[in-house]
Image: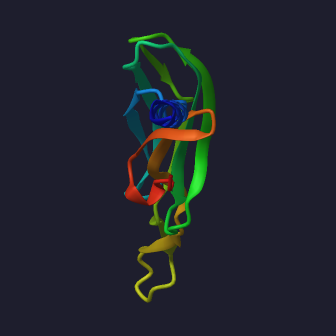
Amino acid sequence: MRVSTLVKGIVAGMMYCNSALATPVLPHVLLKVTLDNGSDYKKIQGSSGKSREEKIQLSIDLDNRDNLQVKDLRVEWTIYSHPLGNVKLDKAGHGSKMLTLEPLKSEEFKSDKITITGTPKHGIVSQDKNRNNNNGNNQNNIITTPVAATGSQYYGYAVQLYSGSTLLDQAYSQSTLKKAN
């Protein structure tokens, strides 16, 4: 009887261990994001100010460190901007890509290229010729007309890597953009 009880205990222990081992193991995929950006400036006619056009694109690199193929990967990326003179964030661009990674392989792809334009607060300078002075001489009056800021500027990016519905990794340029796990 004792051997039988011992065998039952061993079998029960093995079943417990096997069920614990049956828990799915998350793939080991590394995420790396590089920001590719550049700006073009245009002088504002009648002002010393310049408008700015920012071109932003993300290079997203995934590296499968496992010996198994990973089939259900989804990468979601978002580029954020905010209106000039305002702290409210807007989504300037967003995208998603489904992919499969072969064992011990890497894949790199680029997000859409997003353009964000903005003109800061500035003044337009003009001259008004006035002939109403006492000497009869022409007098130039310089007038500066204030112009409010328009458009937006780049704020940051957030990229999430999912396996099914499980968040594996994320990269972000600002800590305020981080999603909770």
Q: Which residue ends up furthest to the bottom in the rendered image? A: 134
* Location of residue 168 with respect to 51 vertically, above or below: above
Q: Residue at x 48, y 10 (%)?
A: 102
- Horizontal relation, residue 163 to residue 49: left or right: right
Give 6 or 116, whichever is nearer the viewer: 6
Indicate the quadrant where residue 151 lies: bottom right
Residue 46 visible in the current orientation: no
Colour scheme shown: rainbow
Give how far across and how far down residue 61 sits, in percent: 41, 24
Give how far across and how far down residue 179 sits, in percent: 51, 53
* Location of residue 112 with respect to 42 vertically, above or below: above
* Location of residue 91 with respect to 111 vertically, above or below: below
Q: Residue at x 63, y 39 (%)?
A: 165
Residue 180 visible in the current orientation: yes
Give how far across and how far down residue 84 sits, in percent: 50, 62
Give 76 or 119, whichever is nearer the viewer: 76
Give 75 or 100, whichever is nearer the viewer: 100
Q: Residue at x 59, y 56 (%)?
A: 90
Q: How many marks?
A: 0
Give how far across and how far down residue 23 sits, in percent: 54, 34
Give 3 or 124, whichever is nearer the viewer: 3
* Location of residue 100 with respect to 144 vertically, above or below: above
Indicate the quadrant where residue 142 lies: bottom left
- Horizontal relation, residue 61 to residue 118: left or right: left
Q: Residue at x 40, y 18 (%)?
A: 66
